[in-house]
Amino acid sequence: MNLVESKPFLRIPPFPGARAASLVGAVPSAAPLGSDVADLVAAIRQAKVGGDYWAKQPALPTHPYTLVRVADSASAETFVAADGQVLLWNDKPSVSSWQVSGSCDPWHLLKNAKRVIVDADDEVALIAAIVGVSVETVGSGRFSDLSDGDASWVEDAVSRHVAAVAHVDPFTGEQIAVSAAVRLCGFWRDLIDRNRGISAALGFAFWKRPTVAPLLWAGEAVPFASDLKGAPAGAVAIWKSRTPPQMIQSLEDDGVPLIEVEDGFIRSTGLGADCVPPLSIVVDRQGVHFDPSQPSDLEDLLQNGSFDDEILSRARDLRDVIVASGVSKYGSGSALLSRRVPDRRHVLVPGQVEDDRSVLSGGGPVSGNLDLLKRARAEAPDAFIIYKPHPDVEAGHRVGGIPEAECLNFADEVVRDQPISALIDLADELHVNTSLAGFEALLRSKLVTTHGIPFYAGWGLTRDLGPVPGRRTAKRTLDELVAAVLLIYPRYLDPVTGLPCPPEILVHRIAEGGGVSQGGAVVQLRRFQGRWKKRLAGLGSR
C-alpha cells in the first residue's frame, strides 16, 4: 500500500463546490521567488501550509512521541516495538496505543513530536524538517537527504520541491511568486481553522447552502440541519432569523456556544429576498454586528484592533475600486444624476425593511421609515430630500412601504429605479436609521447622520443622533473602518472558481459581471411572487 502520492507541496483545499483544482502551472517557475529561501521556509512554518493542512485533527498524546508513517507494515511494527512512545499513522490495526488513519493535518500531528520516521518520498519529512523535528527517512526518495540534516538541507529541499514549481493564481490564471502562493494557502488555512469545532449549522435555507458551505468548511461536510438530534458536540452556527427561538433558548440554557452568521456587506448581484444566494457572509462568535445591545467581533475589532500599513493600503485601494465601479451590497451600477435644485443641499434618506433584525435591534428611537423621513426633515428643513425605498420592499417581499403621498409630505422626491450608489454620489448628506447605505456613503466621503445605531456609528466618522453604546470610545479613520468592515470581518466566495477569496476578487467579479448569476428557477419564482404580492396590495388599497 502506498501511503504517499506525489502531489504539489502547496495545494488548494478541496472546498465543496470548488472548480479550481491546482495552484501549479504547466512549466517550471519563471516567477520571482518573492523572498530568499530562508524567508520562504519561515513563511511556510508560520502559515503551517503544505500537505493536507485542511484535514482532520485527531486527539494526540500529551507527552512527546515519535511519529511513524511508513508504507511497509512490518517495518512500522518494528518501530512501534522499539519505542513505546509512538504515534503510528497507518490504516492497518497495530499494537500501538496511539494510532491515526486516513487524511490528517500533518502540522497538527507534529505538534508534540520529538522525532519523525517516514518513507523518503513522503512530504511529511519536509514538513517535519521545516518545523524543526528530527527526521529519519526509510528507503530512497526525494527527501532522503533530510535525515537529521541541517538547515541548508531543508532550504535546498524547499528550493527544489517548492520554489522551483510554477504557481498560478487560481482567480486570475496568472503566474505568481511562491511567496504569494504561501500567503494564499495561509488565507485558506486561517479560514478552515476558524471553522473547526462547528458541530452543527441551523437555519440555513437550502438555496443559501451551496455558497455558504465553502465559507464554513473545516475539512468535512458542513453539518447543515433543520433540527438537532441530541446534544451538539461543539459550537453551533445559526442563521438566527430562521432558527426556532425555542431551539436557540435550549442551546443557550445548555451553554452551547452559538455563532451567528449573516449576509456580508458586499453580498451579491441580487436580493436575498429573491433567493439569490450570498457570496459573502459574516461569522460572529460574540453577537451579530447590527445589535448594539451586546458586543460583537466587529465592534471589538474597531474598539481594540490594530491596523498595519499594508492593510490600510489595501483598504484605500479597495475603496477606490468600489467607488469607481459603483459596487454596493446587491450589485453594481452607476449613473450620473443631475442635481434637482442647484442651490439646495441634497439629502438622501434610504428606507429599510421595517421588521429586519438590524432595524428591530438597532433602530433606537426610530419607529419606521415614515418616522425616519419626519426626523430627517426636522433636521434638514431647507434641504431637497430624496427618499429611496428599500429594494426588498419594492420587490414586494418585505414590510416598510409608505404611500407616495405620505412620503411627499416630508420628501421632495421618491426615487425607485436608480442605483443607490448613484444617489449617494448625487447627495450631499445621508440621513439613515441603520442602513448599510450610510457606510457606503462614508466610502464616498459623504456626510452621514445616523438616527439609529448602525455598526459604523460612534467611531468619529458620523453625526450620531441615536444612543450609541458607551463601549465605543475609539476614534477611527475611514481606512481603518474599511479595513475592519470589508477586509477582516467578512468572508467572500469567488463565483467563478467556487473558492473562498479576498474581497478584491469578489468586487472585481461583481463590477465586471463575471460568473455572477442572477437567475435560476427559485430566483425567478420569488420575483414573480413579489410582483404578485405588490399587485394584490395595490388592489386592496383601492
Image (cartoon, rainbow, N blue to C red):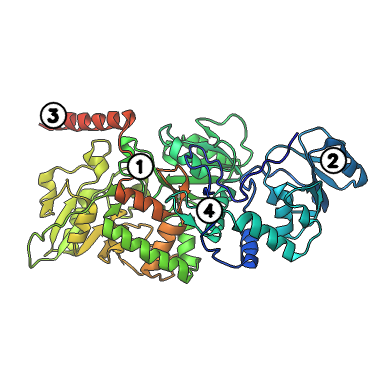
Q: Amino acid at mark 2?
A: Ala
How far apart marks 1 and 4 lie (CA) works out to 23 Å
Task: Provide the residue designation for mark 3.
Answer: 539
Q: Amino acid at mark 1?
A: Gly
Q: Are marks 1 and 4 in contact (CB under 8 Å)?
A: no
Give the class, few, some or many, for how many residues have Cα within 10 Å of label 4's Cα (few <14, many ≥20).
many
Q: Position of residue 455 (x, y in %)?
A: 38, 58
How far apart marks 1 and 2 lie (CA) works out to 49 Å
Q: Are marks 1 and 2 in contact (CB under 8 Å)?
A: no
Task: Provide the residue designation for mark 4.
Answer: 167
Q: Residue at x 35, y 53 (%)?
A: 507
| Image-quadrant location for residue 483 | bottom left
- Mark positioned earlier in the residue sequence (3 or 1): 1
Q: Nearer the viewer, mark 3 or mark 4?
A: 4
Q: Can you tell which mark lies on residue 515?
A: 1
Q: Nearer the viewer, mark 1 or mark 4?
A: 4
Q: Position of residue 11 (x, y in %)?
A: 57, 48
For label 3, the SS is helix
For label 4, the SS is strand
Q: Can you tell which mark lies on residue 76?
A: 2
